Amino acid sequence: MASIKKIQVTFDCAEPPRVARFWSEVLGYDEPPETDGSWSACNDPSGVGPRLFFQRVPEGKTVKNRLHIDVRAGTGLVGAERLAALQTERARLEAIGAVCVRVMEADEENESCIVMQDVEGNEFCLD
């Protein structure tokens, strides 16, 4: 039996074009094409990352995400160097509408990461 190699990540949201533009900017994905506004999608130009699909739903977000995206801005870095890289990426993302929820600095068990929210309040991490 063949295994599935490609996935699409789908977001329920109120403003699909706005959220798609945000994530395209975050990840360096292709600019989403114009649609009727009830949906939008963006693709990794290299074809490696998953397609992100955004669909309008009538209900708003009410609880914490059960699934979230980790933006790997500090891969291979540790300590102060990692935190500095995460803070630089945090500033870039805040300039396009993200909100910082909390900074989790390294301890004896874990490296630093930053919990953020996208333009509709969906949580994601810089790690």
Image (cartoon, rainbow, N blue to C red):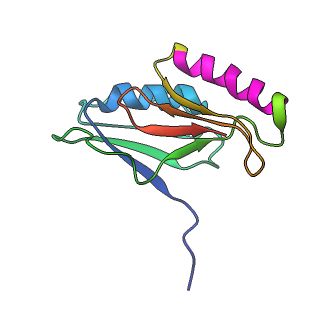
Vertical relation: 105 (above or below) 84: below
The reply, left or right, for residue 88 in relation to residue 41 is right
Residue beneath the point at 70% across and 28% down = 86
Residue 21, by quadrant, is top left
Q: Report the label total.
A: 0
Residue beneath the point at 55% across and 60% down = 6
Image quadrant for the N terminus? bottom right
In the image, is residue 67 part of the stretch drawn in magenta?
no
The reply, left or right, for residue 80 in relation to residue 122 is right
The reply, left or right, for residue 113 in relation to residue 21 is right
Q: Does the rendering let one see residue 15?
A: yes
In the image, is residue 82 part of the stretch drawn in magenta?
yes
In the picture as drawn, the residue positioned furthest to the top comes out as 95
Magenta span: 81-94
Residue beneath the point at 45% across and 51% down = 9
Q: Does the rendering let one see residue 42?
A: no
Chief SS of the magenta region:
helix
- Near-viewer residue (33 or 4): 4
Pinpoint residue 75: horizontal percent, then vertical percent. Answer: 77, 42
Pinpoint residue 25: horizontal percent, then vertical percent. Answer: 54, 25
In the picture as drawn, the residue positioned furthest to the front comes out as 108
Pinpoint residue 59: horizontal percent, then vertical percent. Answer: 17, 41
